Image (cartoon, rainbow, N blue to C red):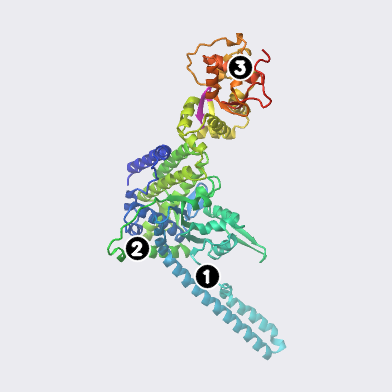
């Protein structure tokens, strides 16, 4: 694959994700796609043979993702320089879907690690034999020393001690074997405490694969007292950061300098929310998430069981076993991208970081950045499998492997966005309201969005207030809102000294709840024009707190006419009224023009005859009122 085709692939993937938000909410039948079919044709031969034995793209996607995670556990010693840090190639993958949706295919990939486990078992038996021989030789040596000491003369004791000291050096090579060897297992249980898991990983010298077809098992672990420790362990393990655990009972401390644990889980959608409860808890950005669709009845075919899918993984298992042995006995592989690939990498993930951070959630930047690490890791795994016969210290990525890794990561990002937008934790009306707002909009346009969602105006105003307070929105100018871009968010985060700008943004949200004096000062600062305090109606037009009407309305000086508040007699105490209800009551009472109605509402609030609960919602004071007082 040449640079031009690679660049086209990158641009197409960026465009697909840029349109992702609209697809999720505008199409009720939207579901994230499978891995593109061309990816399976570009895989390294050993992996391609295992994946292409499946029929549908869904099955192939599940098989590929589970295989990559399993291979990652076997090739854990590959080193990847990335952002001033050195990573290993371990992966965290969770595949979720309704019951009977082909998730069981992941179990086939366990076969990939069979040869690795056989080697570990063989090595353990050899180490065990050395250990027993060392114990036997030391015992014989001590017995011989006891016998000899009975027959020697005291005058010769010095010579014996000197000889004994010299003989001790001959047994130095056995001292390692005097420590009982650990039985290593490449696949580790998920129903385990964090302390026990750390102990197993230490005995494994830092590697292993947590593989469970029922994610509920590990969720039960999270619910225990040690669940928080397990979360912390997984967070550090993904980053290959040192793990330490003090054991009070043994008065010792376990230390794992470079944990390289991989995780492969399958489960139902409700299990996912228990595993990654929030986009900010760290696990969400570390796990690759893939969702499967519900499938209908599948007809049984004649002789369909004659095909042994496990045999299709045989060659791949042998290659991974050989690579694992080479890596464990001294081969140190350093992986790298080419200059063109680094350029494409920065273009792809840099663009997606801006798109998803501004359109989905500002916290989604962590998902994109860690997907960049995952992309590097997938590239290294594909390169090792493609070049297994001639692997040396330096492994350079091919364009084919780079294209495959980008396409896989693009698909995983789409599934991650879909999960975030549709999960029980994040499918809140506020999130959906924000996602459907255009980048720049007026309050009237926001009301249209709220109306389509069957959200009341009062609730919409609360949404706008919360979005502004969370820096998701800002007031670009009077009556116009804008979504904050990543650049603006960075400015707001690091330019804390500019308090005047923040104070102005917060004050803009107060609108009609301000007093007339405060309102006048705010309008004056926004419009840069002096406004008379007595000109209440003009101030209301500038702030526009109640209704959106045509700018062609002519201002009427309604202040000259003393308002009559008989219309308040139409309101019931302990009852809330929105803008439309108040407007209708005023119209029935003879206030036909907008400005007269606006003046009545504004002055009623000023004189304490009407309370504004939040913007656009009102009620009578609880202590009652006299409609003819203060006339």
Q: Residue at x 45, y 50 (%)?
A: 289
- Mark 2 and mark 3 lie on one chain; the one further toward the N terminus is 2
Q: Number of marks in the image?
A: 3
CB under 8 Å between discs 2 and 3: no
Query: For the residues carrying marks 2 and 3, which lies nearer the camera in this image?
Result: 3
The crowd level at tag 2 (other Cα within 10 Å; few <14, some 14-19, many 20+) is some
The crowd level at tag 1 (other Cα within 10 Å; few <14, some 14-19, many 20+) is some
Is 462 placed left or right of 319 in the picture?
A: right
- Would you place residue 59 above or below residue 516 in this image? below
Is 64 placed left or right of 423 in the picture?
A: left
Determine which residue is flagged by label 2. 309
Q: Which residues are magenta?
A: 476-484
Query: Is residue 399 in the magenta section?
Result: no
The residues tagged by marks 1 and 3 sit, at their Cα atoms, a distance apart of 89 Å
Residue 183 is labelled as 1
Instruction: Assign the magenta stretch its main secondary structure.
Output: strand
């Amino acid at each position: 694959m040449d640079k031009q085709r690679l660049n086209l692939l990158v641009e197409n993937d960026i465009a697909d994700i840029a349109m992702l938000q609209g697809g999720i909410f505008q199409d009720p039948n939207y579901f994230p796609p499978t891995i593109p079919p061309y990816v399976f044709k570009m895989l390294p031969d050993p992996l391609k043979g295992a994946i292409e034995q499946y029929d549908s793209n869904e099955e192939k996607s599940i098989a590929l993702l589970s295989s990559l995670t399993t291979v990652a556990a076997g090739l854990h010693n590959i080193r990847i320089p990335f952002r001033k840090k050195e990573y290993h190639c371990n992966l965290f993958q969770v595949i979720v879907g309704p019951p009977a949706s082909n998730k069981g295919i992941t179990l086939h990939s366990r076969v990939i690690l069979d040869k690795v486990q056989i080697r570990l078992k063989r090595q353990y038996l050899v180490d065990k034999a050395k250990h027993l021989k060392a114990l036997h030789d030391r015992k014989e040596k001590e017995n011989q020393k006891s016998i000899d000491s009975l027959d020697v003369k005291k005058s010769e004791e010095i010579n014996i001690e000197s000889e004994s000291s010299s003989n001790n050096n001959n047994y130095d090579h056995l001292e390692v074997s005097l420590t009982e060897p650990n039985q290593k297992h490449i696949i580790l249980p998920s129903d385990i405490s964090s302390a026990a898991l750390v102990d197993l990983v230490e005995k494994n010298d830092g590697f292993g694969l947590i593989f469970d077809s029922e994610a509920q098992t590990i969720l039960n672990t999270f619910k225990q007292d040690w669940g928080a420790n397990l979360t912390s362990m997984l967070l550090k393990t993904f980053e290959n950061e040192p793990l330490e655990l003090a054991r009070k009972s043994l008065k010792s401390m376990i230390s794992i300098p470079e944990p390289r644990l991989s995780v492969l889980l399958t489960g139902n959608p409700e299990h996912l929310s228990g595993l990654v409860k929030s986009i900010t808890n760290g696990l969400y950005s570390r796990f690759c998430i893939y969702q499967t669709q519900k499938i209908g009845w599948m007809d049984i075919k004649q002789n369909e069981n004659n095909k042994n899918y496990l045999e299709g993984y045989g060659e791949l298992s042998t290659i991974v076993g050989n690579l694992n042995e080479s890596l464990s006995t001294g081969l140190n592989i350093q992986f790298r991208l080419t200059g063109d690939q680094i350029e494409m990498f920065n273009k792809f993930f840099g663009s997606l970081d801006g798109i998803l951070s501004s359109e989905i959630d500002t916290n989604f930047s962590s998902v994109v950045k860690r997907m960049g690490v995952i992309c590097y890791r997938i590239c290294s795994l594909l390169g090792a499998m493609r070049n297994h016969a001639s692997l040396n210290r330096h492994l350079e990525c091919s364009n084919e492997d780079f294209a495959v890794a980008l396409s896989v990561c693009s698909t995983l990002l789409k599934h991650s966005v879909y999960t975030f937008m549709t999960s029980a934790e994040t499918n809140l009306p506020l999130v959906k309201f924000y996602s459907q707002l255009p980048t720049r909009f007026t309050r009237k346009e926001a009301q249209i969005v709220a109306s389509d969602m069957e959200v009341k105006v009062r609730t919409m105003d609360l949404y706008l207030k919360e979005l502004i307070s969370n820096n998701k929105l800002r007031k670009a100018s009077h009556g116009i809102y804008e979504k904050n871009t990543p650049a603006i968010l960075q400015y707001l985060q690091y330019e804390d000294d500019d308090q005047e700008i923040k104070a102005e943004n917060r004050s803009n949200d107060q609108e009609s709840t301000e007093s007339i004096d405060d309102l006048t000062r705010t309008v004056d600062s926004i419009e840069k024009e002096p406004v008379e305090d007595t000109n209440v109606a003009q101030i209301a037009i500038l702030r526009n707190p109640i209704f959106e009407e045509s700018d062609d309305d002519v201002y009427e000086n309604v202040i000259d006419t003393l308002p009559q508040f008989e219309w308040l007699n139409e309101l019931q105490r302990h009852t809330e009224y929105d803008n439309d209800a108040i407007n209708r009551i005023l119209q029935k009472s003879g206030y036909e023009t907008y400005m007269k109605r606006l003046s009545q509402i504004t002055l009623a609030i000023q004189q304490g005859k009407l309370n504004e609960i939040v913007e656009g919602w009102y009620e009578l004071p609880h202590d009652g009122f006299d409609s003819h007082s203060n006339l």
